[in-house]
Image (cartoon, helix red, strand yellow):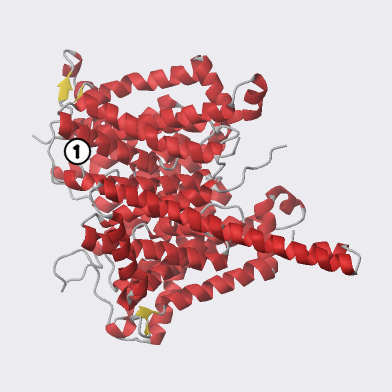
Amino acid sequence: MSATTITELEEPGRRFRLRHVELSWARAGQLALRVGWWIALYGLALVIFGAFAASRHVDPIAMYRAMWEQTIVSPYGLGQVIDKMAPFALAALAVAVPARAGLVNIGGEGQIVLGAVGAGGVSLALGTHLTGGAAIVLMMVAGAGAGALWAGIAAALRLAGGVNEAISTLLLNYVGADVLAYLVYGSWKDASGNGQPASKPLPAADYLPVWGRLQAHIGFLIAIGAAIAIGIALRKTRWGFKLRAVGGNPEAARRAGLRVKVLLLSAMLVGGALAGLAGAVHYAGMEGQLRPGVAATFGYTGFLASWLARHQPAKVIAAAFLLASIAVAGNAIQLSSHLPGSAVNILMAVVLLAVLARRPKLVRA
Amino acid sequence: MFGSHAILVTVLAGAVAGGTSILFAALGEVISERAGVINVGTEGTMLVGCLAAFVTDVQTGNAWLGALAGIAAGAALAGVHAWMVVYRNASQLATGLAVMFLALGITSLYGAPYVSSNITGFVQVKVPLLGDIPVLGPMLFDHDALVYVSYGLVPATWWLLFRTRWGLLIRTAGERPEALRAYGVSPARVRTVAVVLGGGFAGLGGAQLSTALSLTWSESMTAGRGFIAVALVIFAAWNPIRALLGAWLFGAAITLGNVLQAHGYHVNQFVLDALPYVLTLAVLVLLLRRQRQFAPEALGQGV
């Protein structure tokens, strides 16, 4: 309960002011406590991961110094983190929107891959006929469309067949990976390449523009823009309000005359489009080529980022930044400590488990 | 010499051998979900089972000790999941994925030195007489020891769930936890035991994968088998016997592509790879309306 609601109930006068000041102090204390909690939580995660590293004869202090210096502090590292943050944040929004309607989208992996395939398909089809900004816009639109289509399959299975969307999106991840493999081992394989299963590289003019000293592509602007747009859509529009109503109590929403199926479908399609956009951004910003395993685990990471942010669009950006810096730090530990890069998944998991474990216990009647 | 008969036999035998790791994990997931807890971290639980069994086998040369280590590692990791979802009331799906990432990290960290190690592992044992039956012999009775263990574990799991007091407690924890509480049994404790037991099963599945089937260790070698096991449980309507059929079906789909190509047939590998997943989705659509009634009522909810 906020201070203002209390003061409104109080009689005006001296006592009111005192109460107000007291409450503000209490709130400041609460805030300090919360910040303290977060610091302790991340500190704990670092200690646990440090212990893991130490068990493999790696000096944790030196490892953390390398991680810090090669991610946040160096302009090149920070640029890489921001490059990764973009698809992570979009993939997290792809979880957050359906979550508002009570849907679980674990299909980010597949939707991202399809988004990359959509963008890649457009770029291959356009060839040199159309390049630059127009080609980029078309790639983004195609990526979002392909992602929405992939999520739409799961939505259709749920609405028409009653198949749980958590399971169907999970299964469709593997089908999506096979679609990509089918294409890059087959008709989309670059004939003039070195025999690797990969598509023809993107023309230099079709890459997302690079921004400033950090050399980060503008994907992060797309992600931040999407987070703001989704935040407004969920909070300020009737659609957002209705989604929350459906997510809260579908039966009540149906009785109130809301078209629950249309709303669920729209939430899933928007989610899929966001994940598809993540794939397109990663393709046109970083990879420039389709290959098997492109953007692997981005979808699951996005799922974790969304939970880390408790499905709040504004916090999603921060969570995606955190997870992106951990992911990029994987390269640092590989070089400096000779540990496998995927070992940083431990750090990612411990942070998340610590946050999830803080969820207050539900009160049962 | 490569007649259709030979292909059939190879695919059937491969279905059983390749499906066994999924079967163990699916049996574990049946127990866990019957108690009301979904564990998508099964992918990770299998993975730690893979590594623990493999490393133990490398160090001791004893495949059975390896299998035990796999069970222990799987149970320990599932213990993390159980503590989170039962005692901290964390989201089951999010925790499961976080646990999967934890397993990915731990196994890549400790598995790196073992990537090129060799083991003897579990050897193929042909059962006398039964192994000589045409088709059925090579399909069912010419396998590694853990496959035979799975034959025993399927009816044992069914019996545990449906014919013992323990099974009744587990199923009640998944249907009506509050009834269990009224009866004087802690649903939290029952769920914890079920999840940890299920993790042990998945760990054994991982052990079969690394020390009987592939005889190697590589990063993320489970390649989605744990997720398949989770989907399979719905397919199997939370019934251990039907989980057996489903797991073998997956094993067949995984084997079919390799076998057909080895015999010179031109099939598209990726269509075959996608087949098990598409098949599961199709089955879920076709069966689910009838199936939904089998789902434990309090599945996914806190206690």
The quarter of the displayed image where residue B178 is located: top right
Percent coordinates x, y for residue B277 in the rendering: 38, 46
The answer to whether residue A134 is left or right of residue B107 is: right
Quadrant in which the N terminus of chain A appears: bottom right
Percent coordinates x, y for residue B48 in the rendering: 31, 39
The answer to whether residue A12 is left or right of residue B33 is: right
Q: In this view, does A256 lie above or below A188?
A: above
Secondary structure of the residue carrying tag 1 is helix
Q: Badge 1, how many Cα within 10 Å: few under 14, some, many 20+?
A: some
Q: Mark 1 lies on which chain?
A: B
Residue for point 70% across, 56% down: A245
Quadrant in which the C terminus of chain A appears: top right
Percent coordinates x, y for residue A237 in the rendering: 68, 70
Name the foreground residue: B123 vs B48: B48
Percent coordinates x, y for residue A127 in the rendering: 29, 81
Name the foreground residue: B152 vs A182: B152
Q: What residue type is labelled 1?
A: Ser
Q: Name the residue under label 1.
A: B214
Name the foreground residue: A207 vs B79: B79
Q: Is residue A172 visible?
A: no
Residue for point 46% across, 69% down: A144
